[in-house]
């Protein structure tokens, strides 16, 4: 059973130290000691089979040296999602390569959950781990202890075949079945399947955990071939990216790979993060499930995918958004909510898993997300901005049922923009007249008017533009403090990082003095050690007590906004600082504690990597344009 939170903090690795693996259908996190501590099956939003990330007794799968737990070095094989760990032991050196395997897609039978056209390659239901001795002699040890359904359900291991190299476990309840196989003799110790073998220089061994229709490699050569196929898949995918030759290119590469890894190939969805309940406040209660897709992310997602040249990913993500809001039926009325399940599910009712201790005692652990039915008025602006990105200058090609559904969103924004809401940060206190929410309703009306004009829908274009003008007039009247700075909401003069969206979304030009004053005020007054807070906790009714770390997406937004208002040197310095805060594997969680540099919140965080792509690309472009101008 799960612990009561008495485990010391040292038992939980830092969040940023985990390696993230994906095959675009499943994902997992690998701790520095070689333990897979987070894997949900059969989908990334399913219950876990390994959840030591949230409780040290909730299941793990380690493969590494028997006497050493601190690696010498960890990295991704360049251009891939294959994790490579180098170990130094008292008797020798070993490398372990971990991957969620990718292989040819079997198309003999359609999958009912697959809503997109399958690609040539995809996930094959195999977590492969290969150990190679590169010097001396090492002992490779397997320790696999799954606990199903978030650590509540065990199972019984049984041999398959006539040898000792393959075992299977099924839960007492549920239909997830795991098989562990390889070329290491296996046995059972209580609930764990274990094995060990000694390797000398040049020798290798492998183990493969499989589920569904996945098949383990039959030999060491087959394991290496599966590794090579997976490496080739990721490198081929990344080779299509339009990423400039620049010292910051590795950060863009890793961010692109992370976004791809957070995608769910059957539907085209992209998760906000691969985890649930990693805390925003150490030991606190701000612990949420992020294994869903937020409409808030859509415009940023599409802009980043197109910017990097991943047109098919953008098209399929847009397809997921349309499927989600239409329920798969273009002839019904579109319904918009702030987030959806990766299969388009609407009801994401939240519950707590009180048997889990939480990462370093942060409770409760939650599954589902209670914000799914909140009123957040930014959502209309976000989806219309996404439409504008997707159909840039091509609104006439939007089919009539989709156009009518989108028109309903513009009308909804104009019908409700006067009302208070929970805001972009999903605060669980009383609704407020948030300035950024009003601005996003303006985005819905302004983008809608532009799209309608392109289509020749003149009546809507005129009406929506008039609505946009009315919203802008009120925001400029009520949303600006006496010192000429935009305020969080109409009843306060407090700052809010969401106000950085005003220039980014084109509400006012960067040259506007109110925009400039707001950006600089946030940079000077809403930061800790230069990194941006979402808001001042003591002045915002979030429904919770305690501090928050700095929100990394907001810090990258500040980089973008500073560059837009001409503070290029300051933007460059902040960007360099943020990149220095990247985790050891160039991954980011949601927040950064500036006193320790530790990452907080769910991991890896798509929105952070999206904001990185936007900010870094803007600075690189400005550098290149400046260099071109200087050469005349």
Image (cartoon, helix red, strand yellow):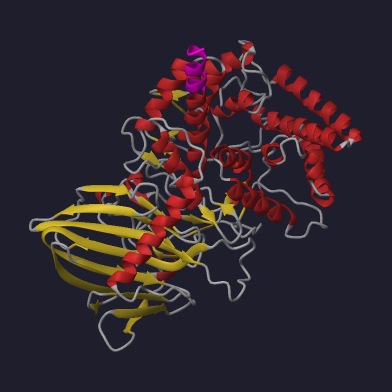
Query: Residue sitting at 43 percent across and 76 percent down?
Result: 177
Residue under the image location 24 percent in, 73 percent down: 194
Q: Is residue 359 above or below residue 150?
A: above
Magenta stretch bounds: 622-632
Whether the magenta-drawn stretch holds residue 189 is answered as: no
Residue 355 visible in the current orientation: no
Residue lying at 77% horizontally and 26% vertically, measured from the top left: 471
Count how many numbered circles sit on residues in the image.
Answer: 0
User: Residue most toward the right?
Assistant: 459
Q: Is residue 236 left or right of residue 182?
A: right
Specify the quadrant of the image occupied by residue 570. Answer: top left
Is 285 left, or right, of 55 in this rendering? right
Seen in the picture, residue 181 relative to 278 is either above or below; the reply is: below
Task: Classify residue 491 by image quadrant.
Answer: top right
* Relative to 10, 330 lies left or right: right
Extreme residue toward the front, this view: 632
x and y, in percent, of residue 486 in the image: 62, 19
Q: What secondary structure is the stretch in magenta mostly built from?
A: helix
Residue 555: x %, y % from top left: 47, 29
Q: Nearer the viewer, residue 57 or 177?
A: 177
Quarter occupied by residue 196: bottom left
Please state the horizontal and vertical placement of residue 530, each as a whole percent of the image.
Answer: 41, 23
Of 579 and 295, nearer the camera is 579
Residue 584: give x, y in percent of width and height. 31, 41
Quarter of the picture holding the N terminus = bottom left
Which one is nearer the viewer's eye here, 558 or 165? 165
Instruction: Inspect the magenta stretch and tell me whether residue 628 lies in it.
Output: yes
Residue plotted at (22% across, 78% down): 185
């Amino acid at each position: 059973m799960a612990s009561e939170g008495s485990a010391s903090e040292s038992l939980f690795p830092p969040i940023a130290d985990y390696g993230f693996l994906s095959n675009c259908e499943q994902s997992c996190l690998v701790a520095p000691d070689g333990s897979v501590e987070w894997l949900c099956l059969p989908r990334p939003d399913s219950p876990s089979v390994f959840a030591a990330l949230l409780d040290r007794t909730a299941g793990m799968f380690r493969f590494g040296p028997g006497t050493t737990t601190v690696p010498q070095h960890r990295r991704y094989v360049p251009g891939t999602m294959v994790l490579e760990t180098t170990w130094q032991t008292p008797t020798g050196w070993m490398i372990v390569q971990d991957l969620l395997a990718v292989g040819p897609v079997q198309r003999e039978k359609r999958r009912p959950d697959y809503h997109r056209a399958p690609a040539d390659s995809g996930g094959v239901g195999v977590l492969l781990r290969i150990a190679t001795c590169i010097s001396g002699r090492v002992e490779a040890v397997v320790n696999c202890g799954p606990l199903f359904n978030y650590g509540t359900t065990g199972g019984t291991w049984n041999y398959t075949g006539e040898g000792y190299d393959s075992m299977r476990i099924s839960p007492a309840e549920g239909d997830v079945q795991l098989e562990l196989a390889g070329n290491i003799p296996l046995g059972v110790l209580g609930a764990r399947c274990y094995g060990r073998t000694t390797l000398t220089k040049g020798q290798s061994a492998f183990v493969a955990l499989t589920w569904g229709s996945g098949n383990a490699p039959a030999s060491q050569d087959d394991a290496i071939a599966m590794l090579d196929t997976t490496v080739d898949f990721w490198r081929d995918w990344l080779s299509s990216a339009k990423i400039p030759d620049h010292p910051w290119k590795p950060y863009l590469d890793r961010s692109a790979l992370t976004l791809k890894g957070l995608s769910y190939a059957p539907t085209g969805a992209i998760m906000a993060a691969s985890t649930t309940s990693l805390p925003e406040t150490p030991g606190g209660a701000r612990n949420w499930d992020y294994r869903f897709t937020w409409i808030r992310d859509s415009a940023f997602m599409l802009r980043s995918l197109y910017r990097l040249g991943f047109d098919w990913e953008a098209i399929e993500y847009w397809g997921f958004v349309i499927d989600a809001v239409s329920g798969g039926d273009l002839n019904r009325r579109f319904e918009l909510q702030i987030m959806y399940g990766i299969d388009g599910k609407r009801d994401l009712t939240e519950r707590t898993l009180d048997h889990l201790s939480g990462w370093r005692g942060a409770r409760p652990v939650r599954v589902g997300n209670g914000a799914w039915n909140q009123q957040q008025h930014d959502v209309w602006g976000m989806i219309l901005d996404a439409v504008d990105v997707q159909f840039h200058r091509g609104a006439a090609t939007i089919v009539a049922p989709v156009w009518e559904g989108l028109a309903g969103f513009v009308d909804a924004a104009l019908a409700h923009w006067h009302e208070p809401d929970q805001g972009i940060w999903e605060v669980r206190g009383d609704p407020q007249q948030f300035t950024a929410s009003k601005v996003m309703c303006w985005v819905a009306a302004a983008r809608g008017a532009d799209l309608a004009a392109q289509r020749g829908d003149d009546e809507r274009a005129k009406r929506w533009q008039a609505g946009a003008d009315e919203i802008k007039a009120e925001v400029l009247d009520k949303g600006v403090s006496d010192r000429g700075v935009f305020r969080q909401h109409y009843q306060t003069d407090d700052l809010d990082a969401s106000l950085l969206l005003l220039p980014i979304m084109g509400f006012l030009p960067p040259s506007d003095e109110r925009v400039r004053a707001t950006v600089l005020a946030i940079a000077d007054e809403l930061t800790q050690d230069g990194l941006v807070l979402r808001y001042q906790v003591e002045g915002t009714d979030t429904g919770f007590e305690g501090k928050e770390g700095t929100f990394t997406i907001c810090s990258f937004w500040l980089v973008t906004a500073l560059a837009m208002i001409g503070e290029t040197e300051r933007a460059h310095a902040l960007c360099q600082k943020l990149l220095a805060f990247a985790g050891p594997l160039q991954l980011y969680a949601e927040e950064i504690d500036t006193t320790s540099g530790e990452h907080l919140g769910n991991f890896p965080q798509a929105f952070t990597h999206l904001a990185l792509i936007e900010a870094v690309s803007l600075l690189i472009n400005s550098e290149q344009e400046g260099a071109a101008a200087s050469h005349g």
